[in-house]
Amino acid sequence: MIIAVASGKGGTGKTTVAVNLARVIGSPVRLLDCDVEEPNAHLFLSGEASERETISVPVPAVDESLCDACGECGRFCAYHAIVSLATKPLVFPELCHGCGGCALVCPRGAIREVDRRIGVIEIRNADGIVLVQGLLDVGVAMAPPLVRAVKAKLVPGEHTIIDAPPGTACPVVAAVRGADFVILVTEPTPFGLNDLALAADMTASLGVPFGVVVNRVGVGDGRVHAFCRERGIPVLLDIPDDRRIAEAYSRGKLVVDALPEYRGHFERLLERTREAVRAS
Amino acid sequence: MKEIVVISGKGGTGKTSIAACFAVLAREAVVVDCDVDAADLHLLLTPRVVRRSEFRSGREAVIRRESCTRCGICFDLCRFKAVAAPGPADGDGSYAVDPASCEGCGVCVRFCPAGAIDFPERLSGVWMVSETRCGPMVHARLGTAAENSGKLVSTVRREARRVAEETGRSLVIVDGPPGIGCPVIASLTGAALVVVVTEPTVSGEHDLERVLALARHFGIPAAVCVNKWDINPGMAGRIEALALRAGAGLAGRIRYDVEVTRAQIECLTAVETGAPSAKDIAAVWENVTSYGGTNGID
Amino acid sequence: MRVAFTTSGDSLDAALDARFGRAPRFLVCDTDSGAVEVIDNQKGMDAAQGAGIQAAQTVARAGVQAVVTGHCGPKAFRVLSEAGVAVYTTDAATVAEALERFRSGGLTEARSADVDGHWV
């Protein structure tokens, strides 16, 4: 079963839900931290990285002896990553999406592809949870290839939790695609509702079934629950607004460890998620 | 003209609430919501839309079913796994492009032997110029699962600078996106000052280092504001020490305040409802405005 | 010699745009004949990414020998120098003023980009 945990807005408790769910699901479980711009799951889990892998995207390299400066590569590239002005083409690797088009269109076979590093993947075993974490290099603007690389570490048949990046744009889509179920985490506030509606549209458009966890229940109003009722979205769990949860989080502690009375909450979430997956 | 960009690294630190307070306190500014993936600023500033424009960006491949010969070359060539092979449910068995995965490179379009793939411009969202109680606001909505939020961010910033020129305002306040990727880079390059809103948690500390590295990378002065500092005073101190070591300034501390959410429900900012944290936010704003910022576009 | 100036206007008294890649237009002046021509930079303005690269191609194709602007980023600079176009940066307020400084030899040719990319 592959469960992705996502949220339209950051800071709603997405990582809290993902790591605590991984803790109660029982081993073997794989936690894929796809929030590659700000990976945080490792802060809540012990264990040193045991494996480290550099992730690259293919970018063009031009063989000057073969290039006749026809300019076809530059005309083709949609990203301005290769430019030819009647001279040998200039390559801007940081703009390249790695589509391979320039190498394909070059009539003289003068372009081959070489690797450009965009980040790393680290794997660690933290008390039965295998954490796979992607970390984008600072100044790199291309998250989706790294998200896809983290997801390639998925082992079929193993329980998998995906901590998705926040928002509704390309990196989230890359993270959520292919999951069996998506848990959208939100807060009972106007911000939370607005972002939940966007995230629900995004998830629905990908055709993945989903449910909602409402975090910090008690701080706002009832509009998030009303929205879920109207749209027929199951509310899988309410987490109360408990300052002790915020404090445990601030110290990097799992809620189910620091506050054992919440273990049942996350076990219920797991049970309801399983039911929802079976039903869909 | 000077741009002050409010960013946070991790989400949920109160960035938007604080940016909205800045907009109210500044009075004479143009406000921009660059958090186009999850725009929230409009919920606090309740803008009245004056002008709405379509945002088109890049292209997307679209396979004409009737022309597809099912050779599968597009499927083999696509590096983004955006082409779906015909499934058993697909009676006529043509290939299809998933718009959410297509990055608009054009490889399939070029190499389709049947010429069956169109490459239209992609409608990716809308952007709006509005009026609010604290001046003009430029904001946008990105289509769900749309690409290119970086360009939309550049578009709304450019529009905000134009509005500022037209209305004779010298300050632009930007509510930036979370993270450190493309939209963030688009929101802060060339700004006079970056205000980083963080919180005293292990995640806040971790993300602050990355955000400050980004500001340094682009040579923009940064000031750090610790929101909800009293949740963990020890960590608040550690974060401030980290900020100073990283060459950033300190903009101040804001207390944990449930009234901020109450204000939000009323569609108001904390500085308009007399919430206890309003004093802290006003002090932070004072500090922020005293940073000269020589990096702006004049 | 044909020299391109970045601007948002369409005449010599228009303001010099400090940006290169996202400048709305280029005013191309022939320093021998005094002829003036306006080149649109819509493609650069519209570029999702690589505005500087796009703008550099636009001016290079227009056959200019030099560009005068406020700031030039590293990617645009690379394309311009590859195309043999000299880059001059100045804080002149108007195109006319920048042209005057250029004519009188008051500008020195840039040896590298003077700002980070994405400066706009």
Image: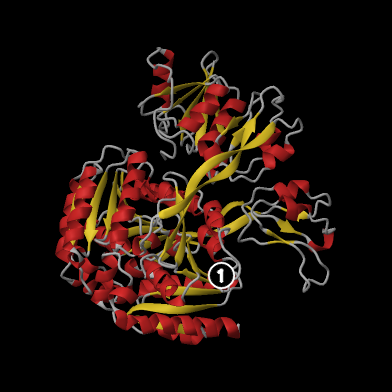
Q: Is residue C67 left or right of residue B93?
A: left
Q: Quick check: A187 above or below A44?
A: below
Residue nearest the observer in this picture, B155 or C50: C50
Tell me which amino acid carries mark 1.
Glu
Q: Position of residue B236 (x, y in %)?
A: 20, 58
Which quadrant is the C terminus of chain B positioned in?
Answer: top left
Residue in the picture at 69% in, 30% down: A71
Q: In this orientation, does residue A209 appear? A: yes
Q: Is residue C71 left or right of residue A100?
A: left
Q: Quick check: A247 above or below B146?
A: below
**Quarter of the figure with residue B221:** top left
Q: Position of residue C77 (x, y in %)?
A: 49, 27
Residue nearest the observer in this picture, B268 or C82: C82
**Quarter of the figure with residue A89:** top right
Which quadrant is the N terminus of chain B positioned in?
Answer: top left
Q: In this orientation, does residue A234 appear? A: no
**What is the crowding at mark 1: few (fewer than 14 residues within 10 Å), some, or many (at least 20)?**
few
Residue named by callout 1? A158
Q: Is residue B280 left or right of residue A67?
A: left
Q: Position of residue B237 (x, y in %)?
A: 17, 55
Q: Is residue B159 left or right of residue B241?
A: right
Residue in the picture at 26% in, 54% down: B28
Residue in the picture at 69% in, 38% down: A103
Residue nearest the observer in this picture, A254 or C28: A254
Residue in the picture at 68% in, 54% down: B120
